[in-house]
Amino acid sequence: MTGRLRIRTMPGRIRALAALAALAVLVVLLVTTLTVRNARDGLRVIGHDAGPQVVATGDLYFALSDMDAQLADALLIGGDAGLAGRRAAALKLYEQRRSEANGALLQGSRLAGTDPTEQRDAQAMLDALGRYERLAGQALLADEQSRHAAGPPPAAVTALYRQATDLMKLDILPKAYNLTLDNGTKVRRTYEAKRSAVLHGRVWVALTGLLLVVVLVGMQIYFATRFRRMLNPALALATVGALVLAVVSVALLSTEAGRLRTAKEDGFDSVLALSRARAISNSAHADESRYLLDPGRADTYEQVYLDKSQTILYVPAGNLDTYYSLVDEKIGGSDFLGFYGTEAHHITLPGQQAALRKVLSGYQKFQNDDRTIRLVATAGDRRRALTAKLGGGTEDFDAYDKALVALKDLHGRAFDQAIASGDHGLRGWNVILPGAAIVLIILILAGVRPRLSEYR
């Protein structure tokens, strides 16, 4: 009863209005702080935690597949004196990819932190890679001892290589891909949850900010009516401040939601897809060497090559001859699917269209070279097929790979810029928000104090 009597008095009403306004300020502070935290968490996971870990495992997949590709080239060249330089280059690149794979595994392990599952997966990868390197070393040693001419090595060497490449394809690469999938799923779920939270939070920030402004305007009108004061300067400043805070907060959250979208859809998704396209392209290029290296599995490697090509750029073809023709026919447009089909239907960045055209042109040359290699090999001239593969075929593939890396880097820069801009945009808001709330409450108290003093 005493509380009701106090509210019925003028000082009680003034204090109640001040308390309501202060409560509205605190609600705005709480809602905005939580929404900003969601934006910051989204940027952290996508840009600094799981996102980089996925990119690292994507690089790991490429390094591993290229290790096996270089091993196949070295064994295919054998002891041919005329190709000794190419064999030395292949072995040097093998060692480089091995170092890159180990580095990517270590980076992935660090990013995994204390997660026991991811730590076990990384350890299993290291163990399997160690077994592969032992088999690769045995195959190279046996190959050097055989001193065979360029072409298929002796059966003992082929048997060792089969064990090594099967271990790579059936055990190591699937483990690397699973690491990518697991962390990719974490990025996707975080993005969907945090961006949705930011967008919904933006609405609540706008509504609570509007409520605060309405309360402050209502106080102004009440004081103007009851005390015949046209303007309360402190409350006017608080009203303007509340309006500015609400507008700026909503604008910030809209921008941060956009940066999350850019980082995820224009950056991360494309980087991941193009990393996969690069690794699969490299593996397909290695299948050309395997096709020449192991005639006993030539048909299998040819079918595997077609399957990988369809993953990269899909056209409805049941065999390689049809695939070559359809690639030549459709490469100038966007009437295809696969990784490059997705890229062609999602042009959002400056320079992306031109970069994609270079990739597709390089891919077309890669397929034309493959057709030549297989035609020559089928005609029985495997030495000439090997020369075509290691000569113009490798040069064209390297140019294609360079164009693909340039396109991936274009998306990588978009990703980095979106994350950096998002981080910069949120910088200082853990101080700005409570500081603004304190200032608004002080202005509210300053606005009601003169009116309360009239009743002392």
Image: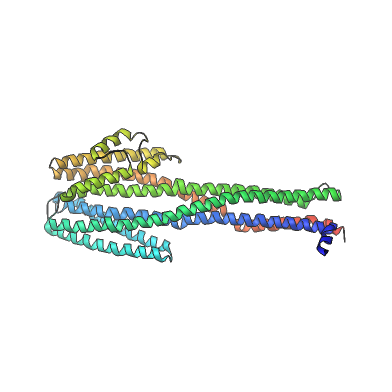
Q: 445 or 294, which is in the foreground? A: 294
Foreground of the two, 264 or 449:
264
Where does residue 52 sit, x and y in percent of width and height? Answer: 43, 55
Camera sees residue 412 = no
Q: Residue farthest to the front?
A: 1
Q: Residue at x 76, y 52 (%)?
A: 235
Going 27% across and 56% down the picture, which residue do you hit?
A: 170
Q: Position of residue 294 (x, y in %)?
A: 17, 51
User: Which quarter of the figure is the C terminus placed in?
Assistant: bottom right
In x, y percent, where is residue 364? Answer: 29, 38
Q: Closest to the observer: 30 or 233?
A: 30
Q: Can you say whether 219 is above or below 108 in the image?
A: above
Nearer to me, 68 or 214 = 214
Question: Which of the 4 quarters of the picture holds residue 310?
Answer: top left
Where, quadrant-wise, is the N terminus in this rendering?
A: bottom right
User: Is residue 47 depicted above or below 373 in this figure?
Assistant: below
Question: How many numbered circles does the render carry?
Answer: 0
State whether residue 352 appears in this view. yes
